[in-house]
Amino acid sequence: MTTIRFHNTRTRRKEVFEPIDASNVRMYVCGPTVYDRAHMGNARAAVSFDMAYRLLRHVYGADHVTYVRNFTDVDDKINAKAAETGRPISDITAETTQWYLDDMAALGVLEPNEMPRATQYIGQMVAMIEELIAKGHAYAAEGHVLFSVKSYPDYGKLSGRSVDDMIAGARVEVAPYKRDPMDFVLWKPSSDDLPGWDSPWGRGRPGWHIECSAMAYELLGETFDIHGGGNDLMFPHHENEIAQSCCAHPEGGFARYWLHNEMLQVEGKKMSKSLGNFFTVHDLLEQGIPGEVIRFVFLQTHYGKPMDWTAKKAEEAEKTLRKIAQLFAAPILSKPWSGNSTIDPPQEVVDALANDLNTSLALTHVRTYLKNGEEPKLAASLRLLGFEPTLLVEKFASLQMRSKSSDARLSVGVDAKGDATSLNGDALMKVQEKLQIERQIALKTKDFSEVDRLKAALLDAGAEVRMSKDGVEVFAGADFDASKLEGLA
């Protein structure tokens, strides 16, 4: 069996992954707070742990992996959104949850086995809080319940900080009911206009951190294999999860391996609304950037390293995906790709992913298979990486056409002047596709006579042809005459 190694944030080293039970490998990942569209940082986390999920399914079997990713549907941000819009909280959370699922599906993210909502587990949270109070790790004060950080000596080991350092560097809420500045809220009171549930401490709602501990315990047990999330969650969220989980269930160890994805930048700068470079997945999809392109860009950078999203990277990713699709679409030497989905991915690709999800190296292998025209290896690798070859053909197989004068991309049925004339667009595309196919055949047979004939016809029709090691590009000039291409395709 393939040996998997992950960088464990808690031990700060790469370790061989040894699941507690190979017949039920368990992973929990912190999901979104559902009050708005998922931004690109949310998407990077989803794609990163989707790759972990896919690898685990490949190695241990799809039926032997349990992946849990939660939805936070009770939160002050959601309350604020409801107050701002006048809409019911339930409507907001239902809508934004579906937005998230739709946007992640566009990026090729598989749905986890379990997607619990916090509001479904309030009773379990109350029970865990009662357990913490009974064991001396939490206390009630003025309608609140707080976790006593000093009651857990290992607090800070995940992030590698001392409590004193955390107090000095963190924004901690100073409240008269707190025994210590670092103590954090497990339960807080709710007014009549806010969501609330009955509890031994009065009507209220849970703090943020307790929800993940309660849901992980209920769905995965007192000890499970992997806990993942964004690097920004390491402190305080994950630190607090460990403390309250290990104190409530000292017989367990909570998560054994901790994986954190690094943050995302845009054009070299931190993504920020104030800088005007903050955008959502939906924004990019609406701009016509396919989800496969977004995923490809993400996978080019190791999940544990900061990633810089740039327009150039998106353009290059689309160009590569287009070449892949053209290879699958072209019936080279009358042997079209069969679309066989039963072929195992090459071991070198599996090994790259097994080495702490080295997606960048896996894509290097993909490019090699593309260059060599190795369709079966390419298709199997793409599937493991979250790309379905048949969908790539549907989306990207048509060759790109651009106006020589404006360098603007043209759609099928639009000629060089931008007029809606299907003749020019269809004719040019068909000949381009034929030229691409014949060129690929010629590279194998060394007979370029048909390539030369098609190129001459395109030039005579007023088009410009550019051929390089990367493929074929055709530009329609202002005097392009599609009638001269009749019969060529």
Image (cartoon, helix red, strand yellow):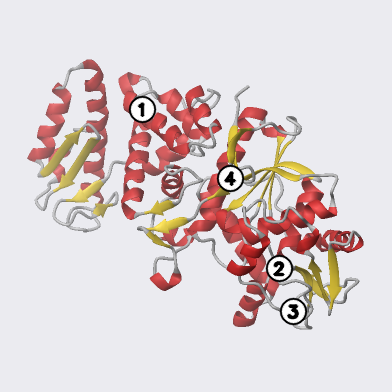
Question: What is the distance, in whole Å, between disc 1 and disc 2 at their CAs?
Answer: 52 Å
Say what secondary structure mark 2 lies in: loop
Question: What is the distance, in whole Å, between disc 1 and disc 4 at their CAs?
Answer: 25 Å
Q: Position of residue 296 (x, y in %)?
A: 43, 44
Q: Earlier in the sequence, mark 2 or mark 3?
A: 2
Few, some or many C-alpha atoms within 10 Å of disc 1 (few <14, some 14-19, many ≥20)? few
Question: What is the distance, in whole Å, between disc 1 and disc 3 at their CAs?
Answer: 57 Å
- Image marks 4 and 3: residues in contact by CB distance under 8 Å: no
Label disc, if present, on residue 49 of the rendered structure: 4
Residue type pointed to by label 2: Met
Q: Earlier in the sequence, mark 1 or mark 4?
A: 4
Q: What residue is at 66 percent from the left and 67 percent from the top?
A: 93
Label disc, if present, on residue 50 of the rendered structure: none
Say what secondary structure mark 1 lies in: helix
Which one is closest to the eye, mark 4 or mark 3?
4
Per the image, the residue denoted by label 2 is 182
Q: What residue is at 41 percent from the left and 25 percent from the top?
A: 375
Question: What is the distance, in whole Å, between disc 2 and disc 4 at their CAs?
Answer: 30 Å
Label disc, if present, on residue 368 of the rendered structure: 1
- Decide if residue 124 is on the left or right side of residue 225: right
- Decide if residue 275 is on the left or right side of residue 24: left
Question: What is the distance, in whole Å, between disc 4 and disc 3 at their CAs?
Answer: 33 Å
